[in-house]
Amino acid sequence: MGRMTFVVEYEDGKEPSVGAGMEVAGGRIVAASWFDYRDDFFTGEQIDVMAKALEELNTQGEISDEDTSSLLEKLDLLTL
């Protein structure tokens, strides 16, 4: 069974009620969040700190070039 993530923006106060088992576009809701998903994004400064730490671990041979690049790409997606 496949799962997809959708983010839908509503005007404040016009959000629909959501419940377990609710059907949407032919599927069934199995999880929902009641917060702005962007609240958990990293700031640019936090990304810089983590990038420096990853580069240092890479220099020390603790993680590979491939892992460093992959992690940096994923961190970039979580930046405001």
Image (spheres, helix red, strand yellow):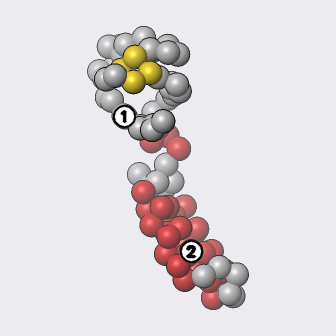
* Residue 52, visible in the rendered structure: no
Image point 51% across, 54% down: which residue? 42
| Pointer 2 residue | 67
Residue 51 as seen in the image, left or right of residue 2? right
Q: Which sits in the foreground, 24 or 40?
A: 24
Name the kind of residue labelled 2 in the image. Answer: Asp
* Residue 8, visible in the rendered structure: yes
Q: Is 24 above or below relative to 63?
A: above
Q: Identify the element where label 2 is drawn.
A: helix
Q: Identify the element where label 1 is drawn.
A: loop
Residue 50 has which mark?
Answer: none
| Pointer 1 residue | 7
- Quarter of the image where one finds residue 59: bottom right
Residue 48 as seen in the image, left or right of residue 5? right
Alpha carbon separation for disc pair 2 and 1: 28 Å
Image spot of residue 30 (x, y percent): 52, 25
Q: Residues within 10 Å of mark 2 (few under 14, many from 20)?
A: few
- Quarter of the image where one finds residue 50: bottom right
Q: How many callouts does the rendering have?
A: 2
Q: Residues within 10 Å of mark 1 (few under 14, many from 20)?
A: few
Image spot of residue 73 (x, y percent): 45, 66
Q: Which sits in the foreground, 1 or 43?
A: 1
Image point 50% across, 70% down: which residue? 70
